[in-house]
Image (cartoon, rainbow, N blue to C red):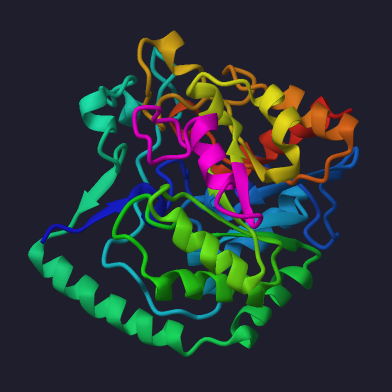
């Protein structure tokens, strides 16, 4: 059997070095001893922890203090790491070679051979856009690690996750959302897998559990959300050819119809790339939108296809088509209490590291809301 892992499982390719390396190279961004406050003009600005890429989980809080961010969407992998979970993967994090100069197309040389447009024959059968295939020996070791991890997970209690939350609270950072992938790639989650994610979320005290998934899995998520009394929000994708994904308003209508606890995690970068209007959609559906993910992408059709490569069609903020500024101003003007989470996915188009780029994104938010 071949085991396939997505880039989210091993950290984003976009990471350039560690937090400490970025801070040392670019100078201190903020006095680490001060308590952060990233609510700007009433808009809650946070960051999803996967934006820090392969950075060790223990370095995320210091990095957030340097940037000045006071809210986080914590991934399940980072929550487990901070709780002392055993290793889950035989594949070490990959830190790509970074050139200090972009090529003529504005790309890191390591990204130059990646296709911009993904043909339907590739995109129709998720996953796509970055995967690692294990050897037979690695599969055997992976199975052993997964067995040990399952035993560790079975022994967790609410106190396990409360201790993780306190690490952030002690630094003045609020854990608003838990991110846990639910079958977008890899095997279909079992009822036990889903229950574990919800128990983790309840232990962390978050207001919503978010993740990428598929419509076929959503009824199980809706039942668990009702049982645990905690909303679940489906994350936007951009493959409009796959009706199982939350890539169109129609797919989101089907998700919301499953029950009052179902919500939307609207990634306005993907939504824009897929050809939809984020501002009007938020106006119509703000009561069911649990959070908004911020990234800048161009409309895929303007680049020659329906679906584009996630690593190549991601741009430094202000260079794409995503209405980040307009969405933030809408939240401000309407006083809608919807958290806006910074994502750093444009590593192919920058020579800077994650901490520096996330700080630039936060500065963009502050300027847009000034």
Q: Which residue is rendered at x = 42% and y = 40% of the image?
A: 245
What secondary structure is the magenta-colored segment mainly? loop
Residue in the picture at 23% in, 71% down: 142
Q: Nearer the viewer, residue 227 or 359?
A: 227
Return the x and y of residue 106 as percentages of the image width and height: 44, 17
In percent of width and height, residue 312 lies at 40, 26
Quarter of the image containing the N terminus?
bottom left
The stretch in magenta equals 236-265
Q: Is residue 161 above or below residue 189?
A: below
The quarter of the image holding the C terminus is top right
Is residue 127 shown in magenta?
no
222 on left or right of 182: right
Q: Is residue 141 left or right of residue 284?
A: left
Q: Tell me how many marks there are.
A: 0
Membership of 263 in magenta stretch: yes
Horizontal arrangement in the rendering, residue 268 relative to residue 123 (left or right): right
**Does residue 128 lie above or below 185 as drawn?**
above
> Relative to the observer, which residue lies in front, 131 or 158?
158
Whole-percent x, y for residue 126 in the image: 29, 41
> Residue 141, located in which quarter of the rendered image?
bottom left
> Which residue lies at the image location 41% right of the left edge and 48% below the top edge?
214
Could you say which quadrant of the image residue 354 lies in?
top right
User: Which picture quadrant has residue 162?
Assistant: bottom right
């Amino acid at each position: 059997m071949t085991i396939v892992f997505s880039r989210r499982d091993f950290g984003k390719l976009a990471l350039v070095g560690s937090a400490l390396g970025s801070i040392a190279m670019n100078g201190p961004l903020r006095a680490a001893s001060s308590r952060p406050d990233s609510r700007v003009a009433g808009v809650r600005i946070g960051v999803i922890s996967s934006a820090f890429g392969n950075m060790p989980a223990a370095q995320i809080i210091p990095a957030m203090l340097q940037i000045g961010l006071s809210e986080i969407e914590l991934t399940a992998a980072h929550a487990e790491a901070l709780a002392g979970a055993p290793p889950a993967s035989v594949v070490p994090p990959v830190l790509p070679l970074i050139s200090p100069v972009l090529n003529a197309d504005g790309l890191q040389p390591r990204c130059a051979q990646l296709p911009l447009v993904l043909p339907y024959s590739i995109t129709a059968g998720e996953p796509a856009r970055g995967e690692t295939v294990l050897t037979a020996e690695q599969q055997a070791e992976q199975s052993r690690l997964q067995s040990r991890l399952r035993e560790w997970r079975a022994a967790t209690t609410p106190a396990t996750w409360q201790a993780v939350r306190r690490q952030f609270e002690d630094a003045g950072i609020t854990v608003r959302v838990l991110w846990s992938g639910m079958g977008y790639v890899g095997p279909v989650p079992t009822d036990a897998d889903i229950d574990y994610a919800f128990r983790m979320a309840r232990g962390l005290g978050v207001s919503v559990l978010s993740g990428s998934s598929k419509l076929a899995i959503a009824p199980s998520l809706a039942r668990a959300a009702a049982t645990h009394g905690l909303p679940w929000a489906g994350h936007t994708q951009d493959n409009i050819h796959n009706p199982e994904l939350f890539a169109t308003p129609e797919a989101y209508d089907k998700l919301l119809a499953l029950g009052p606890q179902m919500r939307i995690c609207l990634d306005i970068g993907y939504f824009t790339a897929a050809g939809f209007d984020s501002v009007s959609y938020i106006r119509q559906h703000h009561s069911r939108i649990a959070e908004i993910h911020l990234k800048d992408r161009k409309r895929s059709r303007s680049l020659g296809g329906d679906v584009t490569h996630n690593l190549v069609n991601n741009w430094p903020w202000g260079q794409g088509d995503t209405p980040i500024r307009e969405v933030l101003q809408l939240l401000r003007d309407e006083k809608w209490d919807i958290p806006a989470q910074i994502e750093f996915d444009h590593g192919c188009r920058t020579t800077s590291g994650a901490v520096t780029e996330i700080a630039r994104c936060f500065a963009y938010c502050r300027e847009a809301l000034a």
